Amino acid sequence: PKVTWIQPSGEKVTADVPAGHNLMEAAVANNVPGVIGECGGCLSCATCHVYVDAEWSDRAGPPGEMENDMLEVTAAERRGTSRLSCQLIAGDALDGIVLHVPQA
Ligand code: FES
């Protein structure tokens, strides 16, 4: 499935991500600046914060309960479309998803 990350500058990275990989791992593997993933995806760092593009927000769905708590401590402001990208999994349902990287 394809995933696109857009930087605050407008710079884009699009990658073909293996199904089942989470989108934090995918960002790190594709050298996307601004998505760190310090905790390795175990919901304890919030450095994988992204804003899901408005067109994709419904399909991505709402954050889980623990994710929701961690979204309170993101470095960049939380918005309605905020998700922790280690909790988004590449797959057919999200093929083509667009994620905006927060301003550092
Ligand atoms: Fe740490 Fe997502 S990688 S919360």
Image (cartoon, rainbow, N blue to C red):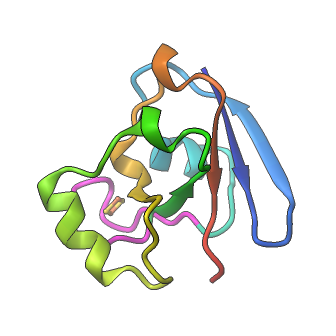
Magenta span contains residue 13: no
In which image quadrant can residue 40 be found?
A: bottom left
Give the quadrant of the N terminus.
top right
In the rendered image, the vertical position of residue 25 relative to residue 20, given as above or below: below
Picture coordinates of residue 90, whole percent (x, y): 47, 27
Quarter of image, ligand 1: bottom left
Judge whether residue 66 can be spotted in this image: yes
**Residue in front for this viewpoint, 24 or 68:** 68
Q: Residue at x 30, y 53 (%)?
A: 41
Q: Is residue 42 magenta?
A: yes
- Residue 95 drawn above or below residue 66: above
Pick the quarter of the image with the C terminus: bottom right
38 shown above or below 28:
below
Residue 4 or residue 22, whichever sits in front: 4
Numbered label tally: 0
**Seen from this angle, which residue lies furthest left?**
65
Q: Residue at x 30, y 47 (%)?
A: 62
Name the residue at 59% across, 22% down.
95
Q: Is residue 6 left or right of residue 27?
A: right
Query: Taking 29 as reference, is 45 above or below it?
Result: below
Q: Does the magenta stretch mainly form a helix, a strand or a loop? A: loop
Instruction: Give the residue at x 82% y 51%.
Output: 12
The image position of residue 18, as x and y in percent, is: 53, 21
Residue 35: x and y in percent read 55, 63
| Residue 43 appears in view | no
Left/right placement of residue 42 relative to residue 103 reads left
* Span of residues in magenta: 35-47
